[in-house]
Amino acid sequence: MKKRIQHYTPVNYAKNNTLKIITFIFLVILYLPIINLIIFSFNDSKRNIVWRGFTSKYYEKLFENEMLFLAFSNSMTIAITSTIISTFLGITTAIALWKFNFYLKKYYDVALLFPIIIPEICMGISMLVFFNYINWPNFQLWPFTLSSVIIAHVSFIFPFVAIIIRARLSMLNNEILEAGQDLGASKYQVIRKIIIPFMSPALVASALLAFTLSLDDFVVTFFTSGPNSVTLPVKIYSMVRFGISPEINAISTLLILIIIICTYFAIRFLSKSNREFMK
Amino acid sequence: MSYGQKVDIIDIDYNWSLINYARATDGVYFITLFKSLIISLITTFLCLLIAIPVAFYISFSSVRVKSILLVSILLPLWTNLLIRTYSLIALLRTKGHINNALENLWESANYLLSFFRLANHNFIGESFTPLSLMHNNFSVIFGLIYIYVPFMIIPIYLVLEKIDRNILEASYDLGANHKITFFKIIMPNISVGITSGIILVFIPCLGSFIIPELLGGADSQMIGNIIERQFKSANDWPFGSALSFILIYITIIILGVRYVYSKLYSRLYQKGVS
């Protein structure tokens, strides 16, 4: 067996006990509320203060609750649609910024970052004012009631997608494209056979990221959604304002689970794309 | 829209008046704006205090531990902001878990004292009074720190990774102690990470409204709450837009200051090298 020899140097701060304790306490405080939330979703008590035994009846209650189901299906529809649209927009933006030089490109870069930087509440309000100003029609038919929320989501999600894909594209060697064109590929073929396979890991990762961002978003949805387009976080918010109940814990636990699964796959695809580059 | 004026319940007159901005800078609104600036500043400062040791520990630990720690810090970022704020309520409220634990502690301490026949002397108070942890400024700041501290840790960690460890060893070789090494060598090197961390924490803190709404009380309202109320219940959209534009101006000013600062910094650095 190989024995690792560790020289003790003052630089090795990992051996420092104070730092260790601070980090430990920090992690405990970071996770205590979330774990507490998950545990108490199984609590058999309406007021949810003291532990009164295991039950899964609040989960069963969730599946019977029609309003919650509606909110959930709204959330899913919004998330899937805005993921598709913002991924498409993000790809085109990333390719445009990477491939072409155009007038005011530098400022376009900054403008792309703007929706990410400004406080979320400003984003939500500007969307609300915008829809009001152009008199966005108030649809009554189901999928169209979600249109304003979808547009709002796309407008703040696609910069994230564009940035991730652009980072990946900057690794692509320009000579490969030229070689492809030398060998007789048309412009369309170059995109289909070289660019898209190259950026596919980043594509999947950013699509998953877009999905979680859309599913998670509360502030922008809160301002743009009407009574016909209640999403899951907005529904949770209105439930929280009425007080604490194990039902909220249960629905939150489910949402956390979905998001953790999505993030797990996103991280895996991203690290795969980075590892390929290292080779 | 922020230059318009409300004339009717639903009609808005767009007449380029500055009256909403004037309203935003006097009286209670100005105090709230000032207060949210102060709260965000305190939060940012405390986040910095927490983030530096944690980032230090992460960047100096072994590869395996490092990846576990990084994932465990990133994971809460992906769970919903609303859910995390809600999960804090269960801990902090008057009959919440922290107060329950403290009460148990008090009772057992009292029980222990009664063994020594000291219980009657009331050393630790006559009876347990729950701490008021909710609906005040403390809970708002605690919630903000809880939500935004990962945004501070990650940039600091990223710049700490880039510091050459040999420089630190050289510093110790030349007889500097921990304190001198930290302030003379590490601080200048991680200042870039600290500034971006400050921006990443300060700007969302200023605009947050869920946390003060759910955790805060009447005296801990922030500017986000007022903006939200102008749109959702007070129905004074021009004034709300004016307030949110003030927020955007503050954001732009902060970013501008940072840009100038980084330009100056790099120029100084180049002079030093040549």
Image (cartoon, rainbow, N blue to C red):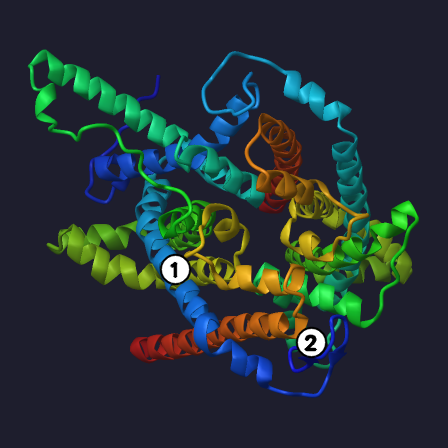
Q: Label 2 crowding class (10 Å Cα cut-off): few <14, some 14-19, many 20+?
A: few
Q: Is mark 1 on a helix, strand or loop?
A: helix
Horizontal and vertical percent position of residue B231: 65, 63
For the residues labelled 1 and 2, the Cα–Cα distance comes to 38 Å
Q: Residue at x 85, y 68 (%)?
A: A135
Instruction: Report the residue marked by disc 1.
Output: B39
Q: Nearer the viewer, mark 1 or mark 2?
A: 1
Horizontal and vertical percent position of residue A175: 73, 61
Q: Residue B74 vs residue B35: left or right? A: right
Q: Residue B46 vs residue A214: left or right? A: left
Q: In which quarter of the image is residue B33?
A: bottom left
Q: Residue A169 vs residue B137: left or right? A: right
Quadrant in the picture for the N terminus of chain A = top left
Tell me whether the residue at label 1 lies in contact with that at label 2, contact meaning CB atoms closer than 8 angstroms.
no
Quadrant in the picture for the C terminus of chain A = top right
Q: Label 1 crowding class (10 Å Cα cut-off): few <14, some 14-19, many 20+?
A: many
The amino acid beneath tag 2 is Lys
Residue B108 seen in this snapshot = yes
Say yes or no: labels 1 and 2 on the same chain: no
Q: Residue at x 40, y 30 (%)?
A: B95
Q: Is residue A25 placed above or below B116 in the rendered structure?
A: below
Q: Quadrant of residue B189?
A: bottom left
Q: Is mark 2 on a helix, strand or loop?
A: helix
Q: Is residue A271 placed above or below B207 in the rendered structure?
A: above
* Count of number-bearing discs: 2
Instruction: Report the residue marked by disc 2.
Output: A105
Q: Which of B67 and A143 is in front in this view?
A: A143
Horizontal and vertical percent position of residue A117: 57, 64
Q: Is residue B188 placed above or below A146 in the rendered structure?
A: below
Q: Residue A227 vs residue B263: left or right? A: right
